[in-house]
Amino acid sequence: MINEDQHIEALKNAVRDPVSALTAVEVDTKHRADRLVKILQQEINNRPGAVLLLLCNQPPGLLLEQAEKEILEWAGHEGVLFIIDQGCGDEKQAHDFWTKMNFLREGWGGLKCHVIFFLLPLNYRSMVRDADHFADWIPLKLHILGISEDNQADPSYQIKDTAFSENEMSFKTARQVLSSLQEQLAQAVHNGADKSLLVQRYYLPMFEAAVKIYALQRAQSLRRHISETDIKETEMPEWLYNNFILDLELRNFDDAERSITRLLEWAKENNDQELEADSYHNMGTIAQEQRDFTSAEKWYRKSLEIEEKHGNEHGAASTYHQLGRIAEERRDFDAAEKWYRKSLEIKEKHGNEHGAASTYHQLGSIAQERRDFDAAEKWYRKSLEIEEKHGNEHGAASTYHQLGRIAQERRDFDAAEKWYRKSLEINEKHGNEHGATITYHQLGYVAQERRDFDAAEKWYRKSLEINEKHGNEHGAAGTYHQIGNLSGLQENYEEAGKWLIKAVIIFIRFNDLHNAKQGANNFMIFYKQSPPETQTRLKAMWEEAGLPAFV
């Protein structure tokens, strides 16, 4: 399978030498087309180049006239004409446009320059289907589309990055950028380089690379050197997007929401519906991470409405995935699986390995919830194969963790600990406290099962410290629950009751009735095991907390 990096290299090679030719590139967003044009303009150096907009509501003959006028004074075959699709309202409008375009193939083929059409999925499909003769005149057809990745240690969301993901920057390249620019930066600082130059040439690309590989502490440090006054207007959307990613990973939800709100305003002002859909999606992610699933679903469906209207399959696949996550959180596993498979069908069709890896992972989670551990392990390993192949340490850490959970469920605690420590090594290296705290919790559980209660409590409290620091109440409640169980196993029943009540109150507040019920059941188990005088105190504690009628 040809990956997107190879398609980008093929596109670069195609423009390096002057030639009269037609090329078609399928892209998922106008922003991606803009970024590709900037890359290609560097390749053609001082040769002439121009950009025209493809508007489906205008006659295609008008676009050809504009092209002929634009290249009138160009010498020979030197120039490159970039034509960027602005989107079509629906299938019918696209069909009408390309049916007429089909009759203009000789006019386009006769232009003495290299014409590159950047087409959104709806128009690309329509060109191939409705303008077959025109399409036959295009020898080079490429596909450079968005990649959605799994983005947390216990993957509960898929960030929408169709407008800004650095397709041309792999995880390996991002690490190389950080390494090479760090050396150059030190020399530039030593030579007294201007601050704005340092930002544009070093701090900003290094910040983007650090965010790409989820090197959170490094990204935070680099961000402190960048002022918005040093950001070019054209770079502001991507700057806001990368800040959103970083703050979401750091659990700074208010800051993450501020970045997306500004991005949404920018999208509306510039009538950029792809970016608008992305922003709605990412608003859903913020709500989901705060366990406001009703709001999250509303945002996702708002995003999906735009994506489906414009035939943006890649964007829709990401949102189908997220709707699956919402269904999974609500423990509607059949609905979740349907959404995941709908997402996966599109990703596999387009060869989107990164996105598919994320959905394989979630199908593993569904199988795990159904106690089908063999199926779960197969899905996780399918996901892991892709993550390791692409050097996606962040995604791999998540899957190592889940393979630890599978080993734990099989009561193979040695294997579980190995997987957890493998996950933890990556998360600690990149300063991913949120990912690390989940694994600290599970290492506590492994120690508890081995009856090493002192070690278990140390792990639980290490997890709890981070959750409380970041205000992650729901995560903290899970650890309160386990510390309560740990106390009960040591026959400290009153202490167990305090922790379990604390957990149940939070679970109820977050409408997590599944875990609330588990906490209440464990409370009752320890209540029945305790002596009469302790039972009296436990019952009073339960009632004083205002919890449902004590039985």
Image (tube, grey):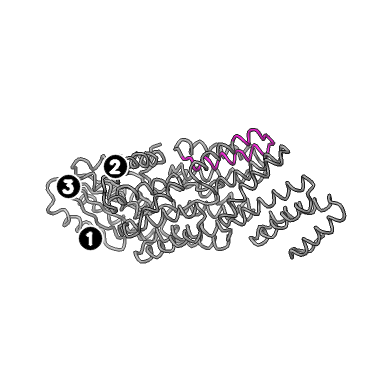
| Left or right position of 337 against 4 | right
| Quadrant of the snapshot with the N terminus | top left
Q: Which residue is mark 1?
A: 62
**Crowd around label 1: few <14 · some 14–19 · many ≥20 (10 Å):** few
Query: Would you call the spot at circle 2 few (<14 residues within 10 Å), some (14-19), or many (20 or more)?
Result: few
Residue 147 pos. (x, y %): 43, 47
Q: Nearer the viewer, residue 251 or 357?
A: 251
Q: Secondary structure at mark 2?
A: helix
Q: Amino acid under label 2?
A: Gln
Which residue range is magenta in the image? 392-418
Q: Quadrant of residue 72?
A: bottom left
Is 181 magenta? The answer is: no
- At horizontal 84% and vertical 59% (from top left) the residue drawn is 536
Q: Earlier in the sequence, mark 2 or mark 1?
A: 1
Asked whether, in this view, residue 41 is left or right of residue 406, the answer is left
Q: Which residue is mark 2?
A: 187
The amino acid beneath tag 1 is Leu
> How far apart in space, not on screen, are marks 1 and 3 (Cα)?
28 Å
Checking the image for residue 46, the label placed there is: 3
Label 2, label 1: how many angstroms apart (C-alpha)? 52 Å
Who comes first in sequence, dot 1 or dot 3?
3
Report the front residue among 170 and 239. Answer: 239
Which percent across, then down, holds residue 466? 58, 51
Dot 3 amino acid type: Asn
- Which of the pair 409/419 is nearer the observer? 419
Name the main secondary structure of what is drawn in magenta. Answer: helix
Marks 3 and 2, how far apart in space?
30 Å
Element type at mark 1: helix
In front of the other: label 3 or label 2?
Answer: 2
